[in-house]
Image (cartoon, rainbow, N blue to C red):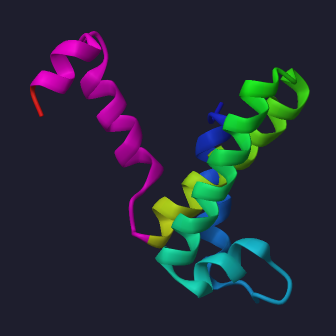
Amino acid sequence: MTHPVARLAATIEARRGADPKTSWTAQLLAKGPETCARKFGEEAVEAVIEAVRGDRERLTSEAADVVYHLLVMLAARGVAWGDVERELERREGVSGVEEKAGR
């Protein structure tokens, strides 16, 4: 079974050519990578606010928005979710301190 994030990434890619009047994803992608990045940033800030407030339900909802907008931003720049997965796999088993030192 495909992971929900991979399915969402595929849906976003499929909506790339959709009518922006009927698809929020198509609207965002049509506005370009800068708009997609700005929207991702807005959603990330909203998630941080809910994390500070401690409302688990709202944080869960905002986190889902963050994931969606991250995927849209990646798609806008031609970065596939599979690329991110491969990078995560490359980092697996490496300590964060070690990984940062290697940059």
Q: Which residue lies furthest to the left in this view?
A: 102
Q: Where does residue 11 sit, x and y in percent of width and height?
A: 68, 60
Q: Can residue 63 be seen in this view?
A: no
- Residue 99: x and y in percent read 19, 22
The chief SS type of the magenta part is helix
Specify the quadrant of the image occupied by residue 17.
Answer: bottom right
Quadrant of the rendered structure where residue 88 is?
A: top left
The verdict on residue 7 being magenta is no
| Front residue of 49 and 98 | 49
Judge from the rendering whether residue 16 lies leftward or rightward of residue 83; answer left or right: right
Image quarter in which the C terminus is found: top left
Q: Residue shown at 16%/15% (left/top)?
A: 98
- Can you see residue 73? yes
| Residue at 58% over, 56% down | 41
Reply above or below: 23 against 57: below
Q: How many marks?
A: 0
- Judge whether 36 appears above or below 26 on screen: above
Residue 29: % across, % down: 59, 78
Say left or right for 75 vs 18.
left
Residue displayed at 65% across by 30% down: 1
Residue 63, compared with residue 99, is above or below; it is: below
How far across and down, in percent of the image, does residue 14 sit?
64, 70
Q: Residue at x 52, y 65 (%)?
A: 37
The residue range painted magenta reads 77-101
Residue 11 lies left or right of residue 23; in this view the side is left
Looking at this view, is 17 or 50 the one in front?
A: 50
